Image: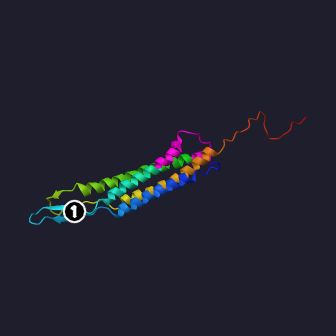
Amino acid sequence: MADGRGSTLVHLLVVVLCLVAFGFVVAAERRRSVGTMQKIEGTNETFCSYSSDVATGYGVGAFLFLLSGESLLMGVTKCMCFGRPLTPGGNRAWSIIYFLSSWVTFLVAESCLIAGATKNAYHTKYRGMIYAQNFSCEALRKGVFVAGAVFVVVTMILNVYYYMYFTKATTTPVSHKANRVSSTVGMAGYT
């Protein structure tokens, strides 16, 4: 870590955890529950029959993998609030920008994942008998998990840049300016 690059293991773990989360999100989008109207023979009752609930599990899995990647990075960097102070300069500014941006995208991604998993589980498990005519089975809209996947990838990229600039800002020595009493313009006094 002497050259300001950071730990390769931390980079690798954050990227792998985010990519696994991305894979789970893609699987969740492809396996969303789809409802079909079923009619009970002999009665006029209809109900919604939904396909498997595996998308909910994938959504929760993606949520947990992304959470673990973010927790790992924040634990290593001590959430930028504790530990060694950052050296003033451009690296500190970029580190703060990437830190805030990664948190915003992380929260949006987690919200999409939890909302998609919850909505998918609600339609799969808690839909009962329907006595209405011309009623359609509700399902999770396309794109909820896709939005989560996009924000997972953006969070991964921002996390990598945050860690890179954070390590540069913590390993770069502070440049001390010499305190000069007189001007150093180099003009000699005329006598």
| Mark 1 element type | strand
Label 1 sits on residue: 49
Does 132 appear above or below 95? below
Residue 56, position as x, y percentages in the image: 32, 56
Residue 121, position as x, y percentages in the image: 28, 55
**Magenta stretch: includes residue 85:** yes
User: Residue extending furthest right?
Assistant: 191
User: Residue extending furthest left?
Assistant: 42
Specify whether 169 is left or right of 112. Answer: right
Which of the colour schemes (rainbow, by chain, secondary structure, one colour) is used? rainbow
User: Residue extending furthest top?
Assistant: 181
Does 97 appear above or below 34? above
Does 188 appear above or below 162? above
Specify whether 191 is left or right of 157. Answer: right
Q: Quadrant of the C terminus?
A: top right
Mark 1 is on which residue type? Ser
Q: Is residue 135 visible?
A: no
Magenta stretch prevailing secondary structure = helix
Q: Is residue 58 visible?
A: yes
Residue 26, position as x, y percentages in the image: 39, 62
User: Residue extending furthest bottom?
Assistant: 41
Judge by depth and name the residue closer to the eye, 133 or 113: 113
Judge by depth and name the residue closer to the eye, 148 or 90: 148
Specify whether 19 is left or right of 191. Answer: left
Residue appearing at x 74%, y 37% in the figure: 178
Q: Which residues are magenta?
A: 70-94
**Magenta stretch: includes residue 26:** no
Residue appearing at x 29%, y 59% in the figure: 53
Residue 24, position as x, y percentages in the image: 40, 59
When asked about the image quadrant of residue 117, the answer is bottom left
Judge by depth and name the residue closer to the eye, 52 or 166: 52
